[in-house]
């Protein structure tokens, strides 16, 4: 492992330290963006200054230096795409109608079941590479397209294989209740989930997840998933309030959820309790835009002091999006957030959701040397919407991606 000296950046994102390694969004104004330098050594952030004798010197003039981006909500690994459904949605067919007529999650489950492990991994590795090139150094995987006991366990095993095959840190979530599998009622499937938990515990999943919606599972199933998470020492996450207001959030909070994700249809009365809880609001503006969903009350959540998080929700149905820079741009425009708020939401706060904030997600000495260099100030992220400004990406102190036109910034000893 080598020493890297990143020198003379125009901006360095500095998140104030807290004991819990998470900054509630009403304090995002305290984030610093002064210029400076950074030294990485032995895979860790060593100092907030430069070193005259390093193995690698990086000319960061004109650049913004950020912690590596953390995408804490993706549905990798999946198989194939569903572009035809997007055309149907644009023409006015709802996600629910598509799901009820055999499309949606069930279609992706059939594709996954029919594909070899190697084919699934090849697609997932390609997507992880695209994510890396957009600055993502940690990503979450979810099962959920297995839709059978063996299928879900296979998806978890594939996520572990992806972790071994890509430079990023991969955290896996067992989304064991995503759609009710054919031949089961929701209650019967939850019995099957309870029965497979010993096998799930042998995989290295960090959380359980459930999709609460009219076309999926109900509040009683959320409660039951919460009890299973507690019994097995796993975190609880939940897809809630995406297409309809089901008042899932009070139930999720009572069940001790680590995050509630989507929230486009969050009830106004649920903003304050969520903001006060040790539970993150994971917002997915790519899914909101492409699904023509409602817009989550993100400004209100941030002002109320919630732990606010952004992610791509990368999946073949609602959000075939890999780029956190795009998600940041959407959040700034559609949520009325500052760029610092948006960046906090896909760095330290996202790491907190994955239980990693003590180790990564901020440029603090001692933390993992996961670092992204943008070729422009952070203000350009939302402003030059759709453009990828990631110039150099370091994972664990090693260069994992350098954009070809930016190679001149690197000088090796
Ligand atoms: O996060 N809403 C449920 N799950 C995914 C969509 C999965 C799919 O359509 O394939 C989501 O939006
Ligand atoms: Fe999702």
Image: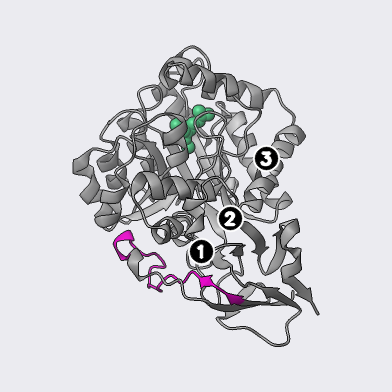
**Residue drawn 66% across the image and 42% down it:** 127
The circle drawn on residue 361 is 1
Task: Please tell me whether mark 3 sits on a helix, a strand or a loop.
Answer: helix
Tell me which corner region of the image, top left, top right, bottom left or bottom right, holds residue 38.
Answer: bottom right
State the residue at coordinates (38%, 72%): 18
Q: Main secondary structure of the magenta part?
A: loop
Q: Under tag 1, what secondary structure?
A: loop
User: Is residue 325 left or right of 238 when viewed as pictured?
Assistant: right
Indicate whether residue 187 is drawn in magenta. no
The residue tagged 3 is 124
Closer to us: 58 or 221: 58
- Residue on which disc 2 sits: 138
Q: Position of residue 46 (x, y in %)?
A: 60, 80
Q: Considering only order in the chain, which callout, 2 or 1, is on the residue closer to the N terminus? A: 2
Identify the secondary structure beneath mark 2: strand
What x and y, as percent, mark residue 208?
Answer: 46, 43
Is 25 colored magenta in this rendering? yes
Find residue 48 and report its image quarter.
bottom right
Q: Position of residue 175 (x, y in %)?
A: 50, 37
Instruction: Find out whether the residues at labels 1 and 3 contact each other: C-beta distance under 8 Å.
Output: no
Above or below, 12 relative to 286: below
Magenta residues, start to end:
8-27
């Amino acid at each position: 492992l080598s020493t890297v000296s990143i020198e003379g950046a125009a901006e360095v994102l500095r998140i104030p330290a807290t004991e819990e390694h998470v900054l509630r969004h009403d304090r995002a104004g305290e984030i610093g963006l002064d210029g400076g330098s950074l030294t990485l050594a032995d895979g860790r952030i060593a100092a907030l200054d430069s070193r005259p004798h390093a193995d690698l010197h990086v000319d960061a003039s004109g650049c913004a230096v950020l912690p590596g981006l953390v995408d804490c909500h993706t549905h990798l690994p999946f198989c194939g795409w569903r572009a035809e459904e997007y055309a149907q949605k644009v023409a006015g067919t709802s996600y629910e109608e598509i799901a009820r007529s055999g499309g949606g999650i069930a279609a992706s489950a059939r594709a996954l079941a029919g594909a070899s492990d190697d084919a699934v991994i090849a697609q997932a590795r390609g997507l992880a590479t695209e994510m890396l090139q957009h600055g993502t150094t940690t990503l979450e995987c979810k099962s959920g397209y297995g839709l059978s006991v063996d299928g879900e366990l296979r998806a978890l095993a594939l996520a572990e294989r992806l972790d071994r095959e890509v430079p990023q840190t991969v955290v896996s979530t067992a989304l064991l209740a995503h759609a009710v599998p054919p031949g089961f009622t929701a209650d019967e499937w939850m019995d099957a989930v309870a029965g497979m938990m010993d096998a799930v515990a042998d995989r290295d999943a960090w959380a359980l997840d459930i999709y609460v919606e009219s076309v999926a599972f109900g509040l009683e199933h959320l409660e039951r998933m919460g009890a299973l998470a507690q019994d097995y020492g796993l975190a609880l996450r939940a897809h809630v309030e995406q297409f309809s207001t089901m008042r899932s959030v009070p139930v999720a909070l009572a069940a001790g959820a680590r995050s509630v994700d989507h929230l486009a249809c969050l009830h106004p009365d649920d903003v304050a309790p969520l903001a006060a809880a040790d539970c993150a609001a994971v917002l997915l503006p790519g899914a909101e835009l492409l699904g023509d969903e409602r817009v989550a009350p993100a400004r209100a959540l941030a002002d109320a002091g919630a732990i606010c998080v952004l992610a791509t929700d990368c999946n073949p149905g609602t959000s075939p999006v890999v780029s956190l820079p795009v998600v940041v741009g959407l959040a700034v425009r559609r949520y009325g957030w500052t760029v610092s708020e948006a960046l906090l939401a896909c760095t330290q706060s996202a790491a907190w959701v994955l239980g990693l904030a003590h180790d990564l997600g901020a440029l603090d000495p001692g933390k993992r040397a996961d670092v992204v260099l943008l070729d422009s100030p952070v203000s350009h992220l939302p402003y030059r919407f759709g453009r990828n400004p990631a110039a150099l990406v370091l994972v664990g102190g090693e260069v994992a991606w350098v954009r070809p036109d930016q190679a001149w910034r690197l000088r090796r000893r």
